[in-house]
Amino acid sequence: MTEVKLGRERNILVVSHTGRTEALNATIEAVVQLHRAGLVPVMTEDQILAVKDYANVAETALKLDEVATEIAAVKIFEVEVAQVDLELVMVLGGDGTILKAAEVVRETSTPLLGINLGHVGFLAESERDGLSEAVSRVVAKDYLVKERLTLDVRVLVDGQETYRTWALNEATIEKNSRERMLEVVVEIDERPLSSFGCDGVVMATPTGSTAYSFSAGGPVVWPSVEALLLVPLSAHALFARPLVISPRSLLAVEVLKRSSGSGVLWCDGRRTHDLPVGARVEVKRSERSVRLARLRQGPFTDRLVRKFALPVTGWRGPGEDSN
């Protein structure tokens, strides 16, 4: 259960994938329910325009003439409502939309509640058919807030910092040209570990262990485990296994001067920066976490089984006689 100061307007930022019809319908539904419950729906100006344009031409599950008041009541984010005045962010979309929302409220660590409209959706708390319940729980302030470890990422060229950013899922160094290999050296806590040619290197959080890192053959790490992951991509080396490293460690990858091409840094698939030959990327745990709102405290094991449709038929459990 989270606490909100009494007497303050309860501003809920709604972030959605407005390029999808399903997301637009869900956005209108969420805005209507929030407003009718006495909360203040807030959206960015461009998303408000997208919803209004859609409402003018589309047939939705709601009768549009009956929700015009609610749509008109939406306040503009960072014009009428500041980041610091938000209680919660309700995100309607897949994990990519949640990552976008996390970027928007990075400075205030406002909790994010995801409603999955995508595919696997590990970061989301509920599915589309649970939207009404999620809104009711938000109205009742009946949700938990969980902290998720994030990464501080910086790029150095000739010893000078040229770029700084962050990541919730992963920071990935990739080759810039498909036909060329990237030559890198990996370093842990200012000590070299191994050098090899590869397609790239993923440095991930436990949250990102089920994202790009998982696709590259990395381990699944429970969110409650504090660790950093390093996963080489198609490395030409005997020692190029995924590594699980202390969250207090400093990870670094250097693009060697013998590399036949330059590289590119991607953070959460959203922020990118070119890496010339000789560039160095340093990654460490950030002091600022991302806060995810949860409606229930189910085991992460159950989430894995549900999201990946894992076969568990025949499981009987420990039984009453087990010690």
Image (cartoon, helix red, strand yellow):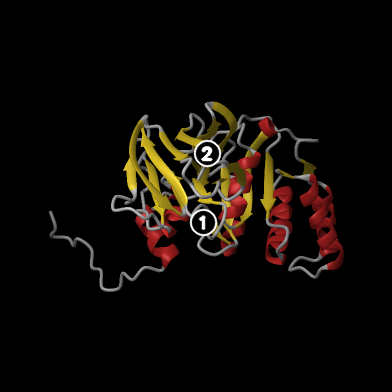
Please tell me which residue lies in front, 125 or 261. Answer: 261
Which residue in the protein does label 2 denote? 290
Q: Position of residue 85 (x, y in %)?
A: 68, 32
Q: Position of residue 306 (x, y in %)?
A: 42, 64
Residue 59 appears left or right of 182: right
Badge count: 2
Q: Residue at x 41, y 46 (%)?
A: 206
Q: Identity of the amino acid at label 1?
A: Arg
Mark found first going from the N terminus, 1 or 2? 1
Please tell me which residue lies in front, 12 or 226. Answer: 226
Which residue in the protein does label 1 denote? 180
Q: Is residue 312 above or below residue 232?
A: below
Residue 87's quadrant in the figure? top right
Tell whether label 2 touches label 1 (CB within 8 Å): no
Q: Is residue 62 above or below residue 70?
A: below
The answer, for residue 167, to whether it is visible in the render is yes
Q: Position of residue 147 (x, y in %)?
A: 47, 38
